[in-house]
Amino acid sequence: MQRPHKAYPVEMAQFHSEDYIEFLHRITPNMQEQYHQELLRYAAHRLNNKLCDVAINWAGGLHHAKKCEASGFCYVNDLVLGILELLKYHARVLYIDIDVHHGDGVEEAFFLTDRVMTVSFHKFGDNFFPGTGDMKDIGDKDGKYYAINVPLKDGIDDASFTRLFKTIISKVVEFYQPGAIVLQCGADSLAGDRLGCFNLSIDGHSECVRYVKKLGLPLLVTGGGGYTKENVARCWTVETGVLVDTDLPNEIPDNDYLKYFKPDCSLRVNSGINVENLNGKTYLSTIKMQVLENLRNIQHAPGVQMHEVPPDNYLPEYDEDDINPDVRMDQHLQDKHIQKDEEFYEGDNDQDHDGGEKGS
C-alpha cells in the first residue's frame, strides 16, 4: 500500500473549474481529509515511473463528476485526473467502464480528443441514470469514433456480457493500441444490487478484470458504484486476488465484520435475485456489429504530438524524515501531514496502538 498526499486545489483544477473546487472547499470544510481521490493521481504517477504494473484504488471510480458540478454521488472525477496524469507519458489511454451506469463524466471530459478512447458497458433506457450513453454517441471533432458506448438492457448475464466484452475490448486494443488502461469496476452491475438491474455474478464481473490484466499493459483499476455492500466487498476482494495473481479461498476468514456476510460466509455467493434477460442475440449482435463498424472509421493507432513531460508538481516538497520532532510544524506543513494518529500504516509500532483496529 502506498500512502498518497493530500490533494491540493491546483491539482484538481487540472480538470475541474477553479470556482467549483473552491465551492467544494467552502461548502464542506470538515470533509477536507476525504479527498482520497488523489490516490488515483498518485497511482498513475507510480505507473508512469514504472514502479508498478497494476495500481488499484477501490475507493475511486467517481465517473459522473463533471468539470463544474457534482453528479451521481460523485463530486471529484478522480478518473479524469488519473488519465490526465497518464497522458503525460502515454500517447493514447484506454478507459473501460463496467459500472451499471454510463461513465458520462469521463466520456464528456475526453469527447473531443483521440488521446483517450472511452468504452462504457451500461444499462441504457427507461429513464435510467444518467440517461446518456446511446450507441450513437461516438465523440466529436478529433474525438469522433473515440467514444464507444455499449447500451444494454435489464438482466444481462455472465455469458452474454463477457462474450461481448472480450470481443469489443480485443478489437479496441487492436485498433487503438493504447499505452495504458484505466478500468472502472463499478460493482452495481452485479446481480442483486439495490440500484442495478444486471445478472452478473462475481465470477462474471471478475472475468472482465482478468481479461484486461492479461493484455499486459500498465493498468489502473478503480472501484465505482455498488449498493449491496456485502457483495461489493466480496467482488473487489476477488478482483484484488485476480490482479495480484492469487487464488483466494471461498470461505471468508473470521473477522470483526463477518456478521455482515451471514448466513453464507463465502466470497462467491448466488444473490438469489434474477432479472429477466432482455438482451436477445439479435440485439447484442447489432451492438457488436455497430461498434466494430465505428472502429473501422478511426485512424489506426492515431499518432499525437508529444510534448515535454510536465513536472510532478504535486509531489511532497519536503522529506518527513528531515523534520525535527522537537520543533512545532507551521500550519503549511500541518496541512500537508494527513496521517491520522488513530490510523495504522505499515512501519508503525503496533504497541503504540494498544491492539486497536488497523487501517489500510
Image (cartoon, rainbow, N blue to C red):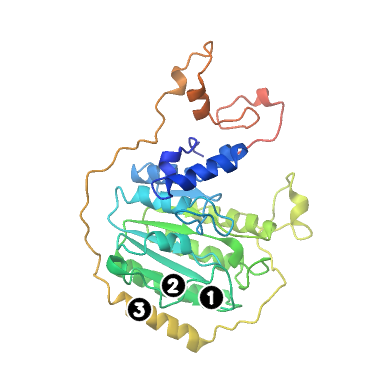
Q: Secondary structure at mark 3?
A: helix
The type of residue carrying mark 1 is Phe
Q: Which mark is residue 124?
A: 1
Q: Residue 308 at x, y = what percent? A: 22, 44
Q: Where 32 falls versus 222 (above or below)?
A: above
User: Residue tagged by mark 2?
Assistant: 149
| Above or below: residue 341 compared with residue 281 | above
x 48%, y 24%: residue: 332
Q: Is residue 73 above or below residue 37?
A: below
User: Which quadrant does the C terminus fall into?
Assistant: top right
Q: Nearer the viewer, mark 1 or mark 3?
A: 1
Check disc 2 and give the amino acid type.
Answer: Asn
Q: Are marks 1 and 2 in contact (CB under 8 Å)?
A: yes
Residue under the point 58% across and 43% down: 27
On the image, the x and y values in percent for residue 210 come to 48, 61
| 3D distance between C-alphas at marks 3 and 2 | 12 Å
Could you classify mark 2 by the number of other residues whose Cα lies within 10 Å: few (under 14), some (14-19), or many (20 or more)? many
Describe residue 272's horizontal placement relative to residue 306 as left or right: right
Q: Which residue is mark 3?
A: 292
Q: Secondary structure at mark 1?
A: loop
- Quadrant for residue 350, please give it: top right
**Image location of residue 325, percent across then percent down:** 53, 14
Tag on residue 92? none
Local packing at callout 3 (Cα closer than 10 Å; few below 14, some 14-19, many 20+) is some
Q: Is residue 72 visible?
A: yes
